[in-house]
Amino acid sequence: MSGLSVAMTVNGQDRSLDVPVTQTLLETLRDQLALTGAKRGCNQGVCGACTVMVDGKPVRGCLSLTVNCDGAEVTTVEGLADGGALSGIQQAMADTNAVQCGFCTPGMLVSAFAFLREAKTPSVEEIQYALSGNLCRCSGYRKIIDAVQLAADRSAEVSS
Amino acid sequence: MNEANPFGGGVGTSIARPDIREKLTGRARYIADLSRPDMLHAAIVQSPVAHARIKGYETTAARAVPGVAAVLTGEDFPDGRMGAFIKDEHAIAKGKVRYLGEPVAVVAAESEAIARHAARLIEVDLEELPPVLTPEEALKEDSPAIHEGLEDYIKVFPAICNGNVASETEIGEGDVEAAWAGCDVVVEDEYETAPQAHLSIEPCGALAEIDEAGRVTLWSANQSVFRVQANVCESLKLPMSKLRCLTPKIGAGFGNKMEPHVQPLVVQLAIATGRPVKLILNRVEDFETVRHRHPFKIRCKTGATKDGTLVAREVEVLLDGGAYGDDSPGVLGYSLLMARGPYRIPNARCHGRLVYTNKMRFGAFRGFGNPQVAFAGETQIDEIAEKLGMDPLELRLKNMLRPGDRWFGGGEVASNGLAECAAQARRAARWGEAATDRSPGTVRRGRGIAFAAHISGLLGTGAIVRLLEDGSVVLNTGAVDIGQGSDTVLTQICASALKVPVEQVALASPDTDGSPYNWGTTASRVTYTTGRSVVAAAKKVEDAIKSHAGEILECAPHDLELRDGGKVGVKGVPDKEVSFIDVSLRAHWAAGGPIVANDSWVFNQPSVDPKRAVARGLPFPQIGVYSFGCVIADVAVDTVTGKAEVTEAWSAMDVGRAINPASVEGQIEGGFVQGMGFALMEELVWDGPRLVNPSMMDYKAPTFRDTPYALHSIIVEEPEPDGPFGAKGVGEIGLVPVPAAIANAIRNAVGIRPRKLPMTPERNLRSMLEADDAA
Amino acid sequence: MTEPGIDVAFHRPRTVEEAVALLRGDDGAMCLAGGATLVAMMNAALVEPSGLVSLSGVDALRNAERLQDGSARIGAMRKHCETAEETVLENGQCVLREAARQIANMPVRNMGTIGGSIAFFDPAADYPPALVAADAVVEISGPDGERTVPAAEFFVGWYETALGPGDIVTAVRLPAAPKGSIGLFHKLARVSGDFATASIALILAMSGETVTHLAIAVGACGPTPVRLPDIEAELTGKVLDGAGIDRLAMTLADKLDPIDDVRASAEYRRLVAPRMVKRAIAEAAATLRGVA
């Protein structure tokens, strides 16, 4: 199938890809790069399971066309850990038992990771506002909020 | 938070799930993430009409598309019929279409895009029949029969069925007719609940692969590898030995993955093409073809004497089952069994009917009919309290089921923590202290309460526990973890039973080849039924260990005790001990054989005692043990728009024993929010035969901002005597009382009495304005 | 998802002129702004463009500026997350900022653009009533050159705007709002991030108890935002009183032309919109009194 050349950095690795014009970033990540962390939950941008970071901002992988991401820096859930060490938010979600089925987790982590880079002492309302685009049907949200606050607290301890 | 534990993560500790890292790093593999070499992708073709005879198919154009490997229509499928209670469903529409959107053909091709493209080129020649769109229409004498062969279908229970009535069930105790005369207050009303979508974030899908011997391996989004196996083999007329069912990671189910979706389709395609075939439904297809919660129409009548003693209850329900029976007869029966509520009401009659309509099937969904009848029953309890001038909590406490009391129908209730649930919820919420806010302003606040009961059931389960050569343990139960945490809990139970750290217990993935039969992850059953099996199998392993140790240490097995960390020694003699390694090596190489034990059982407590109650058309003669709960909810109602929001809630649930407290909380919290969605906003809407909102844009469930952070889960432990370490289930009960508690809170806030779910701003505002007009 | 065998052209022009020329050259081509709407429709096979003209490389569309006369110009490719924090908006112009904050959710706000949103014109979207209340104009470039259209005339009907074939929205411009005026956006929706069931966009300025500026538009209750400048003018210069507000609210309600949809019935919208109007005005007035 004919496509266009796209160069992106994905989780720190330079990638050169040939993609059809109508292929979404979600499809490219999952099907061409075997990064299956981001999920297809609705393909309409509502559920948030496809959330990835493009140039540092969380966006919908299912609503991004890869051809429009030439030169972009993409980070998926697979890129959040540093080698074997889980990022603060990943460890916090383990510690507050915020993960049940785990299907929303990759997108949730990306949104939370990006949020925590800006917000150092987030309130419950701020967390709810930042993550309202990530649906979770299992948890009732409370333990995820606890995880974000825990990660922020730990981060503050480290820097103080 | 995780706690350090002397037993190394056993029962009672909130340890992290064994697969937590996988899920956190995006490496967990769900059905859509799997692939096999040389794999094809499939897509479904859906019927454009609700009720029709299929005259033929036009597939030439589709077959001609480059990359298409197979096109199968109903004519290419065997005519086996599957169904959990009534075997009324083929693998795909055959000869007849019964709901708009029903799969009528499937295409397998080199890519999903090609398959979908080819699917759009397939035409079906249909002779339309008049569609039956409501249960009322379905009940009419002259209404077209949706299942002409209903009488001849195999049924697994004594179903009372005719015409479009798939099942009729009744349970009764005492003499309801005579009892009304003795009541000082009687409340009677009609209620309606809307169909709710499970909305698991993962849509349904399956992948099948056939080997050279013609044996198929099938992975699918499922809640039971055994139900998948049975359904596929029944519908495709395959011997069960020809199908092996495995499970990937599951992205939640809540009931919609308990019975089949596309599994028979991919298996048949794999057989036809000789290649692996994968089919993942998109969200719209998942909405349109899988299953949803039953809409209920309920007439409920409750009577009491003026001192607040509940005397009689009568409930009549009408269920829209959609086009196929699925779990519906079970939902009907269960809702009636639960409809009297957790109260000592001596006279009760609960009767209902399930009808077919030309809509997609309705099926199992967390609560299984109980949330619907609880909405009616628990709001009616409040109405009685109001009429008598009694506190609604006091009225409930006066009448609640006490330890030793039996359930409606006579079933034994071996553990009953309801009083403790009420006491803890009342204390935590400061019931009675918070005065309803009547200050001026456009927001009115109110508080409501509801009680609940639910079962942990039923049917068959097993466990195999095996000691490896080095003394580690392998546990195999066949129970599918759908995200609720059963893998963790069962491992903890096994570890505690054998006094080894959890890290020393490996859990085998469910496999119809190697796992013991497990009916499924449903009915809040896994912790209780499978956990019980694990304890029993572990006990047999303990006995075998002691037998070996007795030989090694030259003493009688009954003088031995298990010690922490995989050891066994003589009671009272600390330095006389051997390790599991010593025992296992002896077993493997010297005598007795490798230690492996199996337990297998079927829940066998009867649901109804024929000396106490009458029952007709009951779909399950044996159901489960009972759990109880109490929810208090605070709401704020915007009097300008009618929109109600939950601001805080307390949910106290009697779970017998919390094997993993954080996971129990997770179930309580998740159940609350799903119940809140059902109560306030979730509604599948049909316009004639067509589902109007089969997308996440148009069907809405609560987000972070619609959900209170102040959700307090309270774990009450009233040990279930037969439960593993006293545990019973919690998967569903957290949802059951929520709509009623919220409805009662709305009443408290703005004085309206909702009788329809969901309690949308529109419905609330209308009621509020009508009440104003009437005043 | 890619339709097999179909080649879709992809262009990434650097200027508006290039973009217009590309659209002129292929009438099956569509503009790709943030993708939040277009890609969702492509995924659902609701549109099948023969070509895509991506505007993400047209820097001229990315700016926001406050002009000499106090008006604010927001480039068409400004994202909702940017408009939600937009500092060039002042006084009552902040109604646009309030609207942006309530669009969808964070990741979608990081993608969606004001130009893309208004060009598609979902009548339940949040910008239209805010732009109408703000007396904004829409700047357009097309095959026939450049023109501006007042917001009230730009939004023509259900998913229909004043854009002709080959036209591109290049910016929206909001005139200066009176000093001290407040901009409010109230949105009733089923859940956070949903399209509105009903929305109210309001700009209010008062001097003591006298209304010096009043502009209010109702969204999501018909094919276009509804506003009654005549009644607003009658109430301006007078003391804010209940009777006047009621008359405004009820007349607005009469002018609504809502439909039944999954979010609500037409009847409910007619019922709730005037109630929301009254509340919005009361709240804005209270805030102004608090500040004064």
Image (cartoon, helix red, strand yellow):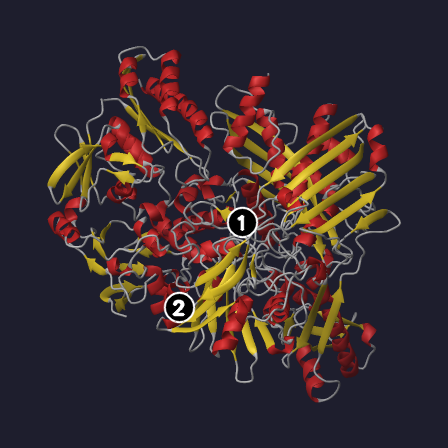
Residue B197 tag number:
1
Q: Tell which subunit mark 1 falls on.
A: B
Q: Crowdedness of circle 2 by 10 Å Cα count: few (<14), some, many (20+)? A: many
Residue in the foreground of this view, choosing between B561 and A112: A112
Residue in the foreground of this view, choosing between A124 and B247: B247
Question: Could you say which quadrant of the image residue C43 lies in?
Answer: bottom left
Judging by the rendered image, the residue that carries numbered circle 2 is B62
Q: How far apart are marks 1 and 2 (CA)?
A: 32 Å
Viewed as shown, does residue B442 lie left or right of B257? Answer: left
Answer above or below: position of B664 versus C76: below
Question: Could you say which quadrant of the image residue C249 lies in?
Answer: top left
Q: In which quarter of the image is the C terminus of chain B?
A: top right
Q: Crowdedness of circle 1 by 10 Å Cα count: few (<14), some, many (20+)? A: many
Answer above or below: position of C47 versus B349: below
Residue B709, position in %: x, y?
A: 51, 41
Q: Tell which subunit mark 2 falls on.
A: B
